[in-house]
Image (cartoon, grey):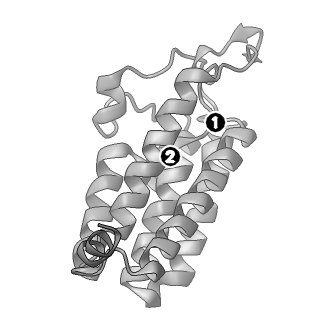
Amino acid sequence: MPWAGRPGAPPTLLESAVPLYHASFHPAGAAVAQIVTLPGQALVSLGLVLAASWRLRKATWLAAWVAGTAVEVFVRQVLTRPPVYRHGLHVAGFDASWPSGHALRCAIVACAFAAAWPRLRIPLLAWLAACAVLLELAGFHMPTDVVGGLLLAVVVAVGAVELERSGLLRRGALGRARAGAG
């Protein structure tokens, strides 16, 4: 974590909700990481996924965002890792940082945009790789946090694709399924 600043407490709810509210722009590498990973912030990513969903006229990726974020929040509440120390100081922010919500939401944004605008797939993949690396280099997450967020994103992305393929989200398909079951 060569660009990591001083260890701090985990962000408050307000700091988590407002983009760049608690952002540290020192050292310069952390500033780059803050800007590059900004689309993974909760409200920003929600807006981006809503835009892609609007373009696709489907709620599949919105459902993936909601499911992934819900699992992330749940896991963070029930899982506490052993204390992590940096420069002899306990980094309390890492106590409940698995999986990385930024990595999760960056991946969901990348998938949603790739579905909505297929020509952007290669740049989106490059951006996602940069996000994963920067989250660790800037000291925002441990490597295992980033991997956990990306793995959770794979699970919800596969779920979104399978939900779309099943046809349950098509107009009338859910109603017909319920009528046939009753």
Asked if labels 2 and 1 touch by Cβ distance under 8 angstroms, the answer is: yes
Q: CA distance from mark 1 to mark 2?
A: 9 Å
- Image: 98 above or below 143: above
Name which residue lies at 57% across and 31% down.
75
Name which residue lies at 47% across and 82% down.
165
36 left or right of 168 in image: right
Q: Amino acid at mark 1?
A: His
Residue position marked by numbered label 2 in the rendering: 102
Give how far across and how far down residue 31 sits, in percent.
48, 43
Element on which disc 2 rests: helix
Q: Amino acid at mark 2?
A: His
Q: Nearer the viewer, residue 94 or 126?
A: 94
Q: Looking at this view, name the residue that lies furthest to the top.
A: 89
Q: Which mark is on residue 2?
A: none
- Image: 120 above or below 160: below
Residue position marked by numbered label 1 in the rendering: 141
